[in-house]
Amino acid sequence: MKKSIFNGKFIIQKIWVCCCLLLLLMGGWNAINIQPAIAGVDLSRQPATEVTVNLSNESGELKFFPNQLKFEAGKPYKLILKNPSPEKHYFTAKDFSDMSWTQKLESGKLEVKGAIHDLELKPGGEASWVFVPIRTGTYRLHCSIPGHTEAGMKGEIIITQDS
């Protein structure tokens, strides 16, 4: 019986080689959008800059305080989220989260690692999110509870290139 050269391992190797060649033709490894801001830097040894955001206030106003956040790409941050209001709120910023590397999210005795898209904070709740923004841009922030965004619970997150 004759062996076929089209076995699974052979095909996977050829696909891998073709993908690598395509990446090189498109402009090298930078074509996959890895920012040099974090390349070769040990982020675990850099202190995180703390930024506090209140989701509403004691009187229940439907706003983020502050509603505009500015971060520099490649620098670690610890975002402290607090909900001093009498109702739950969400910190929703999916596109921002997709363009950031999350080290961890802590709340009480819970620690979460990996992608963060939506955070729900119950009345009196608090969480801290340690992350590094990777890609510059302006990203939408809002509370995804029906009616809250429309009432003014929205903002923006701006990531700039490090200076």
Image: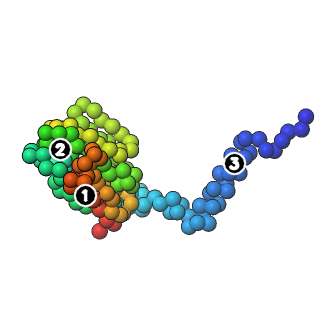
**Which residue type does callout 1 highlight?**
Gly
**Which residue type does callout 2 highlight?**
Lys
Residue 157 visible in the snapshot: yes
Dot 2 alpha-carbon crowd within 10 angstroms: few under 14, some 14 to 19, many 20 or more = many
Give the mark, 3 or 1, whose residue is nearer the N terminus: 3
Residue under the point 25% across and 52% down: 149
Q: Which residue is mark 2?
A: 82
For residue 39, which quarter of the picture?
A: bottom left
Task: Calculate the distance from the C-alpha at mark 2 to the C-alpha at mark 1.
Answer: 16 Å
Residue under the point 25% across and 57% down: 155
- Image location (x, y in percent) of residue 20: 62, 57
Q: Which residue is mark 1?
A: 155
Which of discs 2 and 1 lies nearer the camera? The answer is: 1
Tell me if 4 is positioned left or right of 75 in this view: right
Q: Which residue is mark 3?
A: 13
Residue under the point 85% across and 39% down: 3
Outermost residue, right direction?
1
